Image: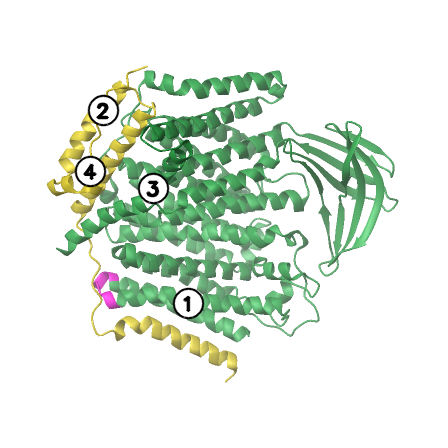
Amino acid sequence: MPELGRAALIVCLGLAVYAVVAGAAAALRRNRRLAESAENAVVASFATALVASLVLLVALVQNDFGLVYVADHTSRELPLGYTISAFWGGQEGSLLLWLLILTGFSAAAVLLARRSAPSLLAWTVPILGGVIVFFAFMLVAVSSPFATQAAPADGAGLNPSLQNPYMLAHPPMLYLGFVGLTIPFAFAMGALAARRSDELWIVVTRRWTLLAWTFLGFGQLLGAHWAYVEVGWGGYFAWDPVENAALMPWLAATAFLHSVMIQEKRGMLKIWNVLLVIGSFALALFGTFLTRSGIISSIHSFTESSIGPWFLGFIGLVLFASIALVLSRLPLLRSKTRLESPVSREATFLYNNLLLVAFCLTILWGVLYPILTEALHGEPVTVGPPYYNFFLKAFGLPLLLLMGIGPLIAWRRASLRGLGRIFAWPASVALATGVLLVLLGAGSSIPGLVGYTFCAFVLASIVLEFARGTRARHALGSSSWTGALASLVGRNRRRYGGYVVHASIVLLAIGVIGSSAYDTVAEQRLRPGDTMAIGGYDLRYRGLEERRGANAQELRAVVDVSRDGERIGTLEPGKNRYFAEQQVSNEAAIRSDRLNGEDLFLIADQIDADGTLFLKGLVKPLVNLIWIAGFVFLAGAAIALWPDAREQRRLALRYGRAEALARA
Amino acid sequence: MSPELLLGALLAAAAVVFVAVPFLRAKDPPEPATPPDEALARAEERDRILAELKELEFDHRTGKITDADYRALVSPLRRRAAALLPAETAKDPSEQRFSAPRVPSSRSDR
């Protein structure tokens, strides 16, 4: 079947080239037939990418080792789920997934905008087509998943660390986020190219941006959990360049989601918003480049990589063309309104934006610095976690505080008297929490103590917002308190969904602070029968057990766990030796306490032939709140994403009337 | 010709037909109306002011804004809204909901 896959990709490339050329010509000549034809080309490109993807999927499932990609990333012993996940386990397959999602999102965006905002599509279609051209070209000419060979008896298998259920969801989720950022970029550039100064592009792409941001955020959390349970070093985020690659566009998109509200409410920050959209998209491309080019492991593999220079060229082109477009349209983007007061809702959004962008840029510098130093001096200067952790505290703590302050301040300006009244309750809760934590001994980490105090402040302000809003709705005539709450959320889904997302960030912060500032670590060499104590737990090493798994030989150290003299379970950290891959992986063992959210995390660092075990144990307080935060985050995003019929009617009235005026 | 190449050719042919559909129609599709910038800017500004008034009213009801702050903010917004609302929208019930709210007399500065 590889010929069909190749043919489908070539047709996809042809359709995308047509969408660019015909779309641009139609926009210049105002030719409606040509424009619709270009739109159809974008829609048809999805069908061809789908055919190519199905061909690869069938080849993977059938173990067709005549395809180089299948032989390099699967084996006969690999379970079916991981065989399917091999689709995105390698460079060529992951690029095909990019193309599939890109064409799917583009087709959906074009079809939806045909009904809601047809006048915006003129230049948007050629821009979407341009991005599709790049990825289709890469798959046709540079990095094809359909290269063939004489089929070997078995494949090389999949990297053992990728053999984890999280790998079925984590990479596609990240790709949905990365690729989703293409849509706001294309519509923003399309609106600028058409010399439009209105906010229709923001209205059309609002949900796309939120959806991409949600996928990117949740995908990172899935990746963190995968790292926690699979990689086995006891952490969930190591500031690895690949992790940073996903974090940077998420931070930029977070800044955009906040600053776009200032444009909608006050008509300000138009240039800033367009730059954030460009930055988010460029960082999504940069993340894909960073992950797949080989530049991270060695600067030399970058020069040998066939994909890296193409990606760099494309990122450069995107940045040059889009910034040139913004510069040429500056008069359209100038706003008439100014910030009235440094103490206002829009001012706190602005501070939030500056902190998010500054944090994003420090991460970008941390990622680029080793690459640049190696290129210039031949030796990379490593930028490790202390660098990132410093900036996490420097920017993260003020961001946390602003999350509590922002929602309580009014738009335009607020008086000191009003501020004193509104902040009295959350500030008192925060102060009381801080004092209580000091009494409980949490003063051992000052950043931890400050972070928890800020968390209490933010949670109190969120509760206050919901309570006051519900009371006001109830006073306006809602029959019940639950009805008043539902009415409150239903009438402003974005705001109250946003508060739920803020609550998830607070949960995340509580989990991160607890598990990093207040964790306990112990290491010990144990013989069978020996014991070890850590953070209130008593561990007794019973001995080794060996068994055969589906595709690996599993060696496990059996450790009995007791607390306060009572046996509470058995943990089995160990190692797996994978047959096909000829690799050994560390398999951590975790016991979660559902009552206090704490984990006991055991790593068999070394297992000697005589049964001696080098055991590392970590007690991580509140770490499970990080994973719970993921579900709260999804709930908040779902509330914000839920269609609001009232708002849609209002927007239809606004743009419908304006378009009716244009027809008159 | 192998079946795979034949399928590839069929895919290409189907794509060409789909792309050519707009040229096969008898009538020209209607040109999407591009509204004049001023009309859109006015509509957006009108909605922005009305939303601000609505939010200001709600913030005042929830006690987020003092009466003094409310009075200082609401008057200029009302004037802007009155200037932007054309005569016919005053009769539009869907927009009357957003029209300038009254200052509640019951609340006093605490």
Secondary-structure class at tag 4:
helix
Tell me the residue that label 2 is attached to: B103
Q: The yellow chain is which one?
A: B
Query: What crowding class fits label 2: few (fewer than 14 Cα within 10 Å), some (14-19), or many (20 or more)?
Result: some
Question: Can I make out residue A245 in this image?
Answer: no
Q: Quadrant of residue A471?
A: top left
For the residues labelled 3 and 4, say whether their Cβ atoms are less than 8 Å apart: no
Three-letter code, disc 4: Gln
Using residue A433 as the reference point, say whether residue B31 is left or right of it: left
- The answer to whether tags 2 and 4 share a subunit is yes
Tell me the residue that label 4 is attached to: B96
Secondary-structure class at tag 1:
helix
Q: Mark 1 lies on which chain?
A: A
For the residues labelled 3 and 1, the Cα–Cα distance comes to: 31 Å
For the residues labelled 1 and 2, the Cα–Cα distance comes to: 61 Å
Query: Residue at position x 22%, y 46% from top?
Result: A654
Using residue B28 as the reference point, say whether residue A437 is left or right of it: right
